[in-house]
Image (spheres, rainbow, N blue to C red):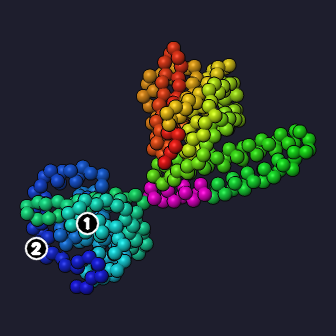
């Protein structure tokens, strides 16, 4: 049979049945496959199924006798698998298929893991699958096989696309609002003080809205290992003043004063936006933890190629809270919080190549630290 990519040769029905019977004698393999959350199958050297777990059979609404001998694309009703008489893996389009390429890697002796997109036709309806697949070589009873597992990540991929599109569109709208609010503020500058103050509030709120959307984009990119660090010259005194001013605009911390105790006239080279976001989170969290008339103290120390930032408040963090402080979505402030401390660690250590930690005692209160190299390469 003709092929444009993977070998077209197939095993006979007798060979498939014999291989299926051999594989099912391996009780450990069968038990592990049935315990897995993945769709799991064993393929022979001709990429044909000789074993499928119950989760896969339930999804396909098939008995095992109906699927052994098929190839993965044929089981999932891939459109390309129908275009050639030789079936799955033999059409020109199959050259870009993640599944076939992964299986071929395993047949060559290499474990392979990647994503795969399959366009299927099920009940005369077009269905698109996004799959995470893993192929691993496996030898049993002097024959070579591929352990092939599949996880459907279609919902995750759709959510990522919707989230990316939503953030992009909302940022465009918020950016427009910010631009017009800036124009309005300038036009009212020479008019009545009350009108100018209202325009300034609108401007500040729109600026905060834009920054929050951008922060969400950065967090999402960081978690997906897509964030690009932008190294610039950062003047520490200017940075610290901008952090304090940004936190003071938050009405939730109006009861607390913020004092910058030590701040050298130092310039460092790092990503200013990420650094500012970490320090704002540190300072805001410290101020929110303060009681009436308490003070947040900030320090910056530059020494031997490093810069140490610290933010202190006089209150103690309970032991059970301390153990969870950097976990994603953990918060003592409500169910919709918990990203701030998590993002400090993520940005500060994974991207700025520093170290983030804290110390908290009943006697001294709580201090969060950020140690950074003064030159981020």
Q: Magenta part of the protein: which range?
A: 155-168
Image quadrant assignment for residue 119? bottom left
Mark 1 lies on a secondary structure that is: helix
Q: Earlier in the sequence, mark 1 or mark 2?
A: 2
Residue furthest to the top: 363
The answer to whether residue 240 of the structure is visible from this angle is no
What x and y, as percent, mark residue 296?
62, 24
The answer to whether residue 353 of the structure is visible from this angle is yes
Crowding around mark 2 (Cα neighbors within 10 Å: few <14, some 14 to 19, many 20+) is few
- Please name the residue that numbered disc 1 is placed on: 105
Image quadrant assignment for residue 142? bottom left
The N terminus lies in quadrant: bottom left
Residue at image position (53%, 25%) is: 367
Using residue 51 as the reference point, say whether residue 331 is left or right of it: right
Using residue 5 as the reference point, say whether residue 278 is left or right of it: right
What x and y, as percent, mark residue 33?
22, 54
Image quadrant assignment for residue 110? bottom left
Using residue 331 as the reference point, say whether residue 154 is left or right of it: left
Q: Nearer the viewer, residue 19 or 362?
A: 362
Give the total number of marks visible in the rendering.
2
Q: Based on the picture, tell me whether residue 160 belongs to the magenta stretch.
A: yes
Q: Is residue 320 above or below residue 138?
A: above
Residue furthest to the right: 191
Chief secondary structure of the magenta portion: helix
């Amino acid at each position: 049979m003709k092929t444009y990519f993977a070998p077209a040769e197939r095993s006979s029905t007798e060979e498939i049945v014999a291989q299926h019977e051999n594989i099912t004698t391996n009780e450990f393999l069968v038990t592990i496959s049935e315990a897995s959350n993945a769709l799991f199958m064993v393929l022979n050297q001709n990429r044909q199924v000789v074993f499928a777990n119950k989760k896969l059979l339930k999804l396909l609404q098939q008995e095992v006798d109906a699927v052994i001998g098929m190839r993965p694309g044929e089981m999932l009703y891939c459109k390309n698998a129908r275009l050639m008489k030789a079936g799955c893996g033999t059409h020109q389009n199959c050259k870009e298929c993640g599944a076939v390429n992964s299986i071929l890697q395993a047949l060559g002796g290499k474990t392979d893991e990647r994503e795969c997109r399959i366009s299927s036709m099920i009940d005369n309806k077009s269905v698109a699958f996004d799959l995470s697949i893993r192929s691993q070589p496996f030898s049993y009873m002097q024959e070579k096989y591929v352990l092939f597992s599949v996880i459907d990540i279609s919902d995750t991929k759709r959510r990522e696309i919707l989230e990316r599109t939503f953030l992009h569109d909302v940022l465009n709208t918020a950016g427009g609002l910010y631009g017009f609010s800036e124009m309005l503020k300038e036009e009212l500058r020479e008019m009545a003080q009350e009108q100018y103050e209202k325009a300034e509030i609108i401007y500040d709120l729109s600026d905060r809205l834009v920054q929050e959307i951008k922060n969400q984009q950065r967090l999402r990119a960081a978690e997906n290992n897509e964030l690009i660090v932008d190294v610039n010259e950062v003047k520490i005194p200017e940075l610290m003043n901008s952090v304090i001013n940004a936190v003071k605009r938050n009405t939730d911390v109006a009861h607390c004063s913020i004092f910058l105790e030590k701040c050298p006239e130092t310039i460092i080279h790092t990503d200013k936006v990420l650094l500012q976001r970490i320090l704002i989170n540190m300072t805001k969290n410290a101020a929110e933890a303060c009681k009436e008339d308490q003070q947040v103290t900030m320090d910056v120390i530059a020494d031997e190629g490093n810069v140490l930032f610290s933010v202190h408040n006089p209150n103690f963090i309970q032991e059970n809270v301390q153990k969870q402080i950097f976990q994603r979505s953990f918060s003592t402030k409500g169910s919709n919080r918990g990203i701030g401390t998590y993002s400090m660690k993520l940005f500060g250590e994974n991207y700025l190549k520093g170290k983030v930690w804290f110390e908290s005692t009943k006697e001294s209160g709580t201090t969060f630290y950020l140690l950074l190299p003064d030159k981020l390469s």
